[in-house]
Image (cartoon, rainbow, N blue to C red):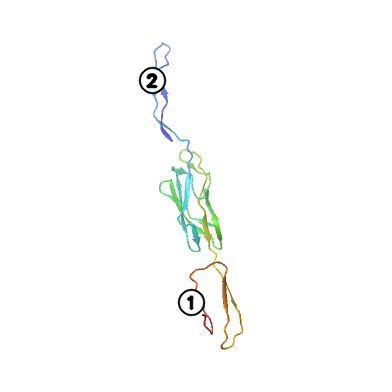
Amino acid sequence: SNTSNVVSLNTSYTDTAGNTGTAATSASYEVDTLAPSATITLSNSSLSAGETSTVTISFTEAVSGFGNSDVTVANGTLSTLTTSNSITWTATFTPSGSVSNTSNVVSLSTSYTDTAGNTGTAATSATYAVDTIAPSATITLSDSSLIAGEASTVTISFNEAVSGFGNSDVTVANGTLS
């Protein structure tokens, strides 16, 4: 954007009587041919059930005609985008349930413009992961018909890696777990 443009008139002209014309200069005018661009960031790039992430879209200049319809999110929803200056916009991303995907992105289309009317450029965030599938377990016993004094191996198999699991997480009726 350049705001120091002027139209100048030289003294090389004359009227019909042969008098040399005077020089003139217009007021400054603006020429803006630069398309706005944006960067997209997420405050949390690894989301699990119950978590959210702030999505920030920062433009290189003020934009108009911009809103949620210009943004695509994968495996979740985006709250209404808000701004105080038409340059930095924020919203809350909430992941969908029952999803496990590590290659999600937020995408920005080219359907917005800057205040001069230049069409915006597309943008894509870095990838973010969504895992809202709860782990599950299968419990098997090596012997399911026990009498006093016998023991059975209990095997608990999870469908994915878990943390914080221990004997205190297991309840055993009429016996103990070691």
Q: Can you tell which of label 2 and label 1 is closer to the viewer?
A: 1
What residue is pinned by disc 2? Answer: 23
Q: Secondary structure at mark 1?
A: helix
Indicate the position of residue 152 as horizontal and vertical percent values.
58, 81
For this rendering, which residue is in front, 169 or 64? 169
Note whether 4 is above or below 154 in the view shown. Answer: above
Residue 143 placement: quadrant: bottom right
Indicate the position of residue 24 as horizontal and vertical percent values.
39, 22
For this rendering, which residue is in front, 22 or 163? 163
For this rendering, which residue is in front, 9 or 159? 159
Total tally of numbered discs in the picture = 2
Q: Secondary structure at mark 2?
A: loop
* Direction from residue 31 to residue 175 in the image, left or right: right
Question: Tag 1: residue type?
Answer: Ser
Instruction: Give the mark, 2 or 1, whose residue is nearer the N terminus.
Output: 2
Indicate the position of residue 104 as horizontal and vertical percent values.
54, 55
Residue lying furthest top: 17
Note whether 103 is above or below 159 in the view shown. Answer: above
Q: Residue 85 got which mark?
A: none
Residue lying furthest bottom: 148
What residue do we see at 48% from left, 50% from top? 40
Indicate the position of residue 84 as horizontal and vertical percent values.
40, 48
Q: CA distance from mark 2 to mark 1?
A: 92 Å
| Few, some or many residues within 10 Å of mark 1 (<14, 14–19, 20+) | few
Q: Quadrant of the N terminus?
A: top left
Question: Tag 2: residue type?
Answer: Ala
Note whether 37 is above or below 152 in the view shown. Answer: above
Note whether 130 is above or below 39 in the view shown. Answer: below
Find out whether the residues at labels 2 and 1 contact each other: C-beta distance under 8 Å: no
Q: Residue 168 got which mark?
A: 1
What residue do we see at 38% from left, 20% from top? 23
